Amino acid sequence: MKKQFSRQDYENIAAFIAERTQYRPKIALVLGSGYSDFAEAIADADILPYGQIPGFVRSTVVGHSGQLVIGALDGHEVMIMQGRVHYYEGFSLEEVTLPIRVMRAFGIDTLILSNAAGGLNPAYRPGDLMLIEDQINLVGMVGNNPLMGPNDPALGPRFPGMSALYDRRLRELAIDVAAKLKQTLHRGVYIGLSGPAFETPAEVRFLRLIGGDATGMSTTNEAVVARHSGMRVLGFSGITNVAIDAIDSKRETSHEEVLETGAVLVPRLTAILRGVLARWDEVS
Ligand code: HPA
C-alpha cells in the first residue's frame, strides 16, 4: 500500500496555510454535520476554502461547508475545519485524515472533534451531548486503519498505543465545565462506521452489544491519526437521533433529521467549548 502523501507534503501544505494567516493557533476544532454555525463566532477570521488548499478534498455532503477558518475565539487562537470529508464519499483514509497531519505540521497540539451521532444508549435523547470517553474504530478493526501502509517514524510510532486516546485532563475539564453550566453531558463510547447507509436494527443491537453508546460515520480515523502524531484529543458527539433497534419501526433515520437536531445542539456545544477555552490555562 503506497502512501499518497509524505511528511514533506504535510509540511508544504502547512507552510501554504501559514503564509495566508498571521494566526499561529495550537488548538484545532473539527465541526461535524450541522455545527457549521459555530465558526461564525470567530472574529477577524482568515478563511481558506478547501478547494484552494493543496491536497485538501472537498466535502460533497450537505451541511459541510468545506473551509478552514483561522482566527480567535475569546482570545484563544483556533483553527477550525468547518466541515469534514468522510470515507463514504469515496476518499481514501489518507485523504480523510490529511488535514490532521497538516495541522500537526502547522503546530497544532490539541484537536477537538465533534460529530453528529445516533444514540445507541437507551438513555440518550435527540439533542443530548456526549463526551467521547473512548471509541471503537470498527472500520479500522476490520482492516482499514488510517495508519496502514509504510510508517514514517518522524510522524509517529509504527504501533501507537491507543489506551489513552481521548485526553483525561481535557475530558475532566469538559465534564466540570458542563456541570457548572448545569448541562447534562453524557460520557460514552463512540463507534465509527463507514456509512453512508444508516444501520439496520440488527446492526444497532450489535453496536450496543459491543459497548457503543453513540455511532456515526466520522471522527475515529481523525482521532487515531491525531493521537499517532502525539496530539491531545477531545471529542463530542451530538445525539441527533435515536438509532432504531426494531424492525418494522414506524420511524426512519434521515440526514435532514440529523441536520435539524445538529442546529439545536450548536448553542449547547458552543457553550461547553467556550467554557473549556476560558479555562485553557488549566490544561496547557
Ligand atoms: N447512524 C450513523 N451515523 C449517524 C447517525 C446514525 O444514526 N446519526 C448521525 N450520524
Image (cartoon, helix red, strand yellow):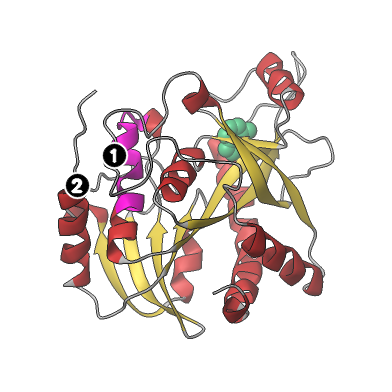
Q: Which amino acid lies under the numbered mark 2 shown in the image of this protein?
A: Gly
Q: Position of residue 238 (x, y in %)?
A: 64, 50
Q: Which residue is mark 2?
A: 55
Q: Is residue 254 left or right of residue 30?
A: right
Whether label 1 touches label 2, CB < 8 Å: yes
Q: Quadrant of the C terminus?
A: bottom right
Tell me: residue 28, above or below residue 138: below
> Looking at the rendering, which quadrant does residue 256 occupy?
top right
Q: Secondary structure at mark 1?
A: helix
- Residue at (31% x, 78% y) in the render: 23
Number of numbered labels in the structure image: 2
Q: Main secondary structure of the magenta part?
A: helix
Q: Is residue 157 visible?
A: yes
Q: Position of residue 208 (x, y in %)?
A: 74, 26
> Looking at the rendering, which quadrant does residue 265 occupy?
bottom right
Q: Along the polypeptide, which appears first: circle 1 or circle 2?
A: 2
Q: How crowded is the residue under tag 1: few (<14 C-alpha within 10 Å), some, or many (20+)?
A: some
Q: Which amino acid lies under the numbered mark 1 shown in the image of this protein?
A: Glu
Q: CA distance from mark 1 to mark 2?
A: 8 Å
- Residue at (21% x, 66% y) in the render: 17
Q: Position of residue 236 (x, y in %)?
A: 61, 53
**Quarter of the rendered structure image containing ligand 1:** top right
Tell me: residue 201, above or below residue 5: above
Residue 94 on the magenta span: yes
- Residue at (57% x, 25% y) in the render: 198
Q: Which residues are magenta?
A: 89-101
Residue 95: which numbered mark, if any?
1
Q: Is residue 244 left or right of residue 262?
A: right
Q: Secondary structure at mark 2?
A: loop
